[in-house]
Amino acid sequence: MNCEGYRDKLIDALASGESVSGGEVVAHLRVCAECKKFYETQVRLFGAIDSGVRAVVNESVPASLLPRVRARMKEVQMAGTNWKLSWNVVAVAGVVVLAALGFVARREPRPTAVLVETAAGARIVPGKITRVLAPEKAEHPIIRRRHRESEEPYSNTESPNCSSEVLVPGEERVGYEQYIRTVRAGSRSPAKETKFVDPIEIATQEIAQLQIQKLEMNSLAEEARE
Amino acid sequence: MRELVLIQPGRVLVGASERESESCRAHREFEERLAECGPLAFRVAYGVLRHAADAEDVAQESLLKAYRNFGRLREPARFRGWLVRIAFRMALDRWRSVKRQEKRETQWEAPKQKAAGPTVEELAVSSEFQARLERAIEELPEKFRLVLLLAGIQGYTLEEVSGMLAIPMGTVKSRLFFARKQLAEKLR
């Protein structure tokens, strides 16, 4: 082995932190002055590297580090609590909004009857009050086709702003249906045929006078005396 | 059909208190480790940055990150290695951003003079050799660099470095060997 080979072995030994103990390398160092000098230089170099690295990493720790970390940890804890609190507030607000929506929805009247299609193309809702939907509002394809075939202005109201729904009492449903058919056949406007009747007048006619038999009337003064 | 739900208020309370006690326990455990591992995080950061204020900031951020995620750590025995990696990564990020900033400043501004003169200790440490050594350390691959820095920290043996990084002892030795050899080649 020449000097280069010995020097590589020397460097490997120093880099691994081991002492040069190989008999052949030690023997060469005894006889080769240049390699011995190289070895001494390398020992100093590796020593300087080690001390330099130690100087880099063993810097004294500032006393403010741990207190600062502890203070930040408290902040993190507080932030976590605030976050939980804010979510609780959001959850409560959500529940309140849902309850309010539910209350409003319950107050609105809801139709409970089933829609039935009639031959006239109208839709009738059986129930306490029957709701007859005008064909304009009906979305059934048969009705649309009929409308297109007849090619006439298809309205049972005089003005477009008028409501196209008519409320009919349940017992008059069949009669109204027949009436609609008659009107269609004669191509008359149902609105023109409809007469206004004052509901108060009807109510006064229908409601009988209240008559209570064997009703005794005593004044409070008499009762107190007794 | 109405669905019946069994509500157990006592159990809910127990669960909440368990969670709270668990978080308290985690906080206590972290506090116990903080005194030991805080300086380690700082030294790793300083080894990369070689600037005390920056290293302190990085150590603080890495400790906070570890604190936030302490509950997710499956093996608490690995805490030191985990923290060291966090600190090392964050320090490298900081170092890169500092370098980028320096580069921008040197491109657009006239070179600035140092504000304060070095102390006696700084003069001793910041010799020409030390500056060359620090540059050489910067150029080392990250995995060599981390092992070199950890092995250089006072009080840590190679076995501890191996346990900390969860790598075999042979790997630690070989990384240290190549790190020292590369440094010697650059400084020769």
Image (cartoon, rainbow, N blue to C red):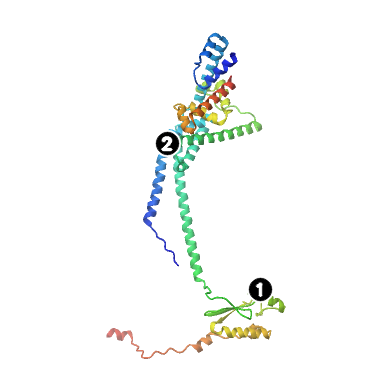
Q: Is residue A218 left or right of residue A143?
A: left
Residue B96, percent from left and from top: 58, 34
Q: Of residues A155 and A120, which is closer to you in this image?
A: A120
- Against A97, residue A116 (above or below) is below
Which residue appears at 41% of the width and 42% of the height?
A: B26
Which residue appears at 40% of the width and 51% of the height?
A: B16
Residue A67, percent from left and from top: 44, 36
Q: Of residues B81 and A198, which is closer to you in this image?
A: B81
Residue A141, percent from left and from top: 66, 73
Q: Amino acid at mark 1?
A: Pro
| Residue topped by disc 2 | B33
The answer to whether residue B117 shows anywhere in this view is: no
- Mark 1 — on which chain does it sit? A
Which residue appears at 48% of the width and 87% of the height?
A: A207
Residue B164, percent from left and from top: 47, 33
Q: Of residues A26 and B81, which is closer to you in this image?
A: A26
Q: Quadrant of residue B142?
A: top right
- Against B164, residue A179 (above or below) is below
Q: Of residues A93 and B141, which is closer to you in this image?
A: B141
Q: Identify the element where label 2 is drawn.
A: helix
Badge 2: residue crowd in 10 Å (few <14, some 14–19, many ≥20): few
Q: Which mark is residue A141?
A: 1
Which residue appears at 54% of the width and 35% of the height?
A: B89
Q: Amino acid at mark 2?
A: Arg
